[in-house]
Image (spheres, helix red, strand yellow):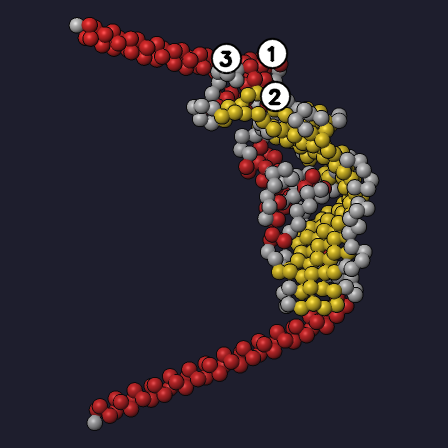
Amino acid sequence: MRTFGFKYYDYIYTIICCLIFFLLDCSNLLGGDIDLQEALTEVCNYRIENGHAPNDEVFFKIISEKKSSLSPVEQNEVWREIVRQQKSRFELTDIINIFRAKTNSIRDYESKFTVTKNGVSSNQKRIIHALKGTNFFLEIDNYDKNRLEKRTLAYDGQLLYTVIDDHNSPFASIQNLGVSAISFENNNPLAQSMLYDTNQTGMPHSGFDLLHFLSIFPNVVVLEKEEEFFGRRCLVIAGLSRRIYLDIESDLSVAKFQEFTVSSQNNPKGGRLLDGKRTLLSQRELFDLRDYTNGIWLPQKSVYTFYDSTGAVDSQTVITYESIRLNHGLADSYFNDIFPDGIPVADSINGLIYNSSDRPSINGLLKDITKSKRVIVLRYISVCIGLMLIVIALVMKYRVYLANKNST
């Protein structure tokens, strides 16, 4: 009886524990629902209290207050409600159409600018950059006293031409490369203004191409409340880790781009749980926007700042644009005729090394060789076809002979 009694109470105890754990779990779920409803109510009441829809900063404030009770799914629901609350006069589709029209209007472009890092004049480089379709030209002249070097690259859609001048023994090269040959120079004014079609470089980059940015960040939104940047009224495209300011008076041209690191942790039930902390990682500010027609406004100065985890400035790059030209009809020779006279050229296409001054005669010789090779190949093909016809004729004649022989 004692053994039976022990087992009986043991079973009762187990059932009671299971009921307690079940009720506790239900309580947690109920509490989570209550916190989600409170968060959504706070989002909805924000307009009544402030006269406009809440933004991304309000979202992180709510998440910070309720990070222990909202699941990743519920956090996403709060952000979706903030997105639904926005009543901006521009939709994302409007901005996509505007930037697509701007990008399509650029037939060719050339710019000259100076890049200075951390305000040190010795750590400087002067750049000439040009584009025409998939053709590009890039000349980099380093001012760094430890790297007295000038590098020039040109790509004509098929061949990459390179000249490296170290002021001692300059040399050049020709290579047959595909779209990967296109050098991505992100300091140019089109990239800084997010008007650079980075897909044609083979290296798409969301920080310098607004159309690509919007294609890979579908959860961003145009905020209802406009903000100011150095006295300029701006629309703000906001996401959890990015912010883009569009200058309204400059045909929605990019005025500032911000990138954040968002703190999160693994959730035991799956997904990543935001803890409400967001830290500014980098910031690009564009100044003195000028009109280059077709709604394209480009900066005369750009300041690119990186921050450490404490928010202090880690490094800064200042880009000063000396000249910018759009749609001036750049000649095709701009993208392949870059070799100065008298330097060695390593031609990997034809497996030759020659002096650049001899390139015209070398090209003529190579054309003659190619032409003679084509003639030889055509003659060979003609001979082969003639032999095949002779063989076919002999076979047919032999068949006729066998047929006549069998009939007799």
| Secondary element type, mark 1 | helix
Q: Residue at x 61, y 48 (%)?
A: 201
Q: Nearer the viewer, mark 2 or mark 1?
A: 2
| Secondary element type, mark 2 | helix
Location of residue 252 with respect to 50 vertically, above or below: below
Residue 160, image quadrant: bottom right
- Dot 3, crowdedness within 10 Å: few (<14), some or many (≥20)? some
Task: Please state the horizontal and vertical placement of residue 82, each as a whole percent of the image.
Answer: 54, 22
Give amino acid for label 1: Glu
The reply to whether discs 1 and 3 touch (Cβ–Cβ < 8 Å) is: no
Report the side of 18 relative to 301 (left or right).
Answer: left
Task: Please state the horizontal and vertical placement of residue 125, each as a whole percent of the image.
Answer: 78, 45
Q: Residue at x 49, y 83 (%)?
A: 383
Q: Nearer the viewer, mark 1 or mark 3?
A: 3
Q: Pick the residue in front: 127 or 100.
A: 127
For label 1, the residue is 49
For label 2, the residue is 57
Mark carried by residue 100: none
For label 3, the residue is 38
Report the side of 4 relative to 102 (left or right).
Answer: left
**In the displayed image of the protein, which residue is found farthest to the left?**
1
Cα gap from disc 1 to disc 3, whole angstroms: 16 Å
Q: Residue at x 73, y 57 (%)?
A: 163
- Dot 1, crowdedness within 10 Å: few (<14), some or many (≥20)? few
Give amino acid for label 2: Glu
- Dot 2, crowdedness within 10 Å: few (<14), some or many (≥20)? few
Cα gap from disc 2 to disc 1, whole angstroms: 16 Å
| Secondary element type, mark 3 | helix
Give amino acid for label 3: Glu
